[in-house]
Image (cartoon, helix red, strand yellow):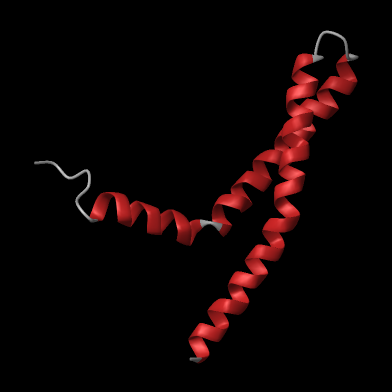
Amino acid sequence: MKDQHKTLIKEEGQQKVLKLINPFMALLFFIQISSGALAEILPRRTFGILHSGCGALLTLLVFGHVLLHTNWIKTQYNRTFKLGRYSAQ
């Protein structure tokens, strides 16, 4: 019972972090698309700061997002490949 409580607390903490990360990822993704589309119009320095800086931050947030979903990824992998759905016949 104690382990279940710790797991619930951990999941609640992960959800709080994801609620912070996900909107920032969406914003940074939009900035990446916009700055890429406006590369010819934006001054080189502005483009460099926006595109490179936001790209680096987006990469870090995606990495964190994947780390927070590690258990889900493992579960999906096990359901798909370890239960024989795609096993060689």
Residue at the limit of the structure toward the left, as seen here: 89
Residue 19 shows in the view: yes
- Which residue is situated farthest in the bottom direction here? 1
Mark yes or no: residue 52 visible. no
Q: Which residue lies at the image location 24% right of the left edge and 55% below the top edge?
A: 82
Q: Where is residue 47 in the image (x, y as percent from the top left)?
A: 84, 20
Left or right, residue 86 beside residue 27: left
- The picture places residue 72, in percent across and down from the top left corner, at 47, 58
How many dots with numbers?
A: 0
Q: Kindly indicate the quadrant of the structure image that contains residue 8.
A: bottom right
x and y percentages locating residue 7 in the rendered image: 54, 78
Q: Quadrant of the C terminus?
A: top left
Q: Which residue is drawn at 72% across and 57% down?
A: 19
Compared with residue 64, is residue 39 higher up or lower down, i.e. above or below?
above
Residue at (60% x, 47% y) in the render: 63
Furthest toward the top, the residue is: 40
Report the front residue among 86 and 46. Answer: 86
Q: Where is residue 59 in the image (x, y as percent from the top left)?
A: 65, 40
The residue depicted at 56 percent of the width and 85 percent of the height is 5
